[in-house]
Amino acid sequence: MSNDMSNLNMEREKLEIIKWVTSLKDDTAIERLRMLRAKPRKLDWWNEITDEEKSAIDKGLADIKAGRVRPHKEAKKLYEKWL
């Protein structure tokens, strides 16, 4: 019975997506959907980024764990001349 409910929920979700897609006005979103259909990606993005990017992410996560963070307002004020 739960498999039937799962299938029903999946069908309902598909219909919601179809409804959403038919209302899109954004060419970029439509192009991305077209690309997804042409080449579905099943790879994990982590495996596709460079070692440099992975290192930067790991450093950022370590900074968060160590409490080396600033509120968004402070960061925005600090970098406002470049924004």
Image: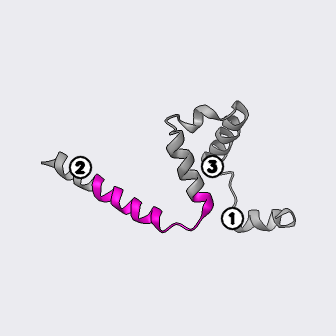
Residue interval drawn in magenta = 10-29
The residue that mark 1 highlights is 72
Q: Residue at x 62, y 44 (%)?
A: 61
Could you say where residue 78 lies in the image, as x and y percent from the top left? 81, 64
Real-space Cα distance between discs 2 and 3?
41 Å
Q: Which mark is residue 7?
A: 2
Q: Residue at x 52, y 66 (%)?
A: 24
- 6 or 23: nearer the viewer: 23
Q: Disc 1 or disc 2, which is closer to the eye?
A: 2
- 4 or 79: nearer the viewer: 4
Mark 3 surroundings within 10 Å by alpha-carbon count, few (fewer than 14), some (14 through 19), many (20 or more): few
The answer to whether mark 2 and mark 3 are in CB contact below 8 A is no
Position of residue 31 relative to residue 60, above or below, is below
In the rendered view, does 74 fall on the left or right side of 67? right
Real-space Cα distance between discs 3 and 1?
13 Å
Circle 3: residue type: Ile
Could you say where residue 4 lies in the image, as x and y percent from the top left? 17, 49
Q: Which mark is residue 64?
A: 3
Mark 2 surroundings within 10 Å by alpha-carbon count, few (fewer than 14), some (14 through 19), many (20 or more): few
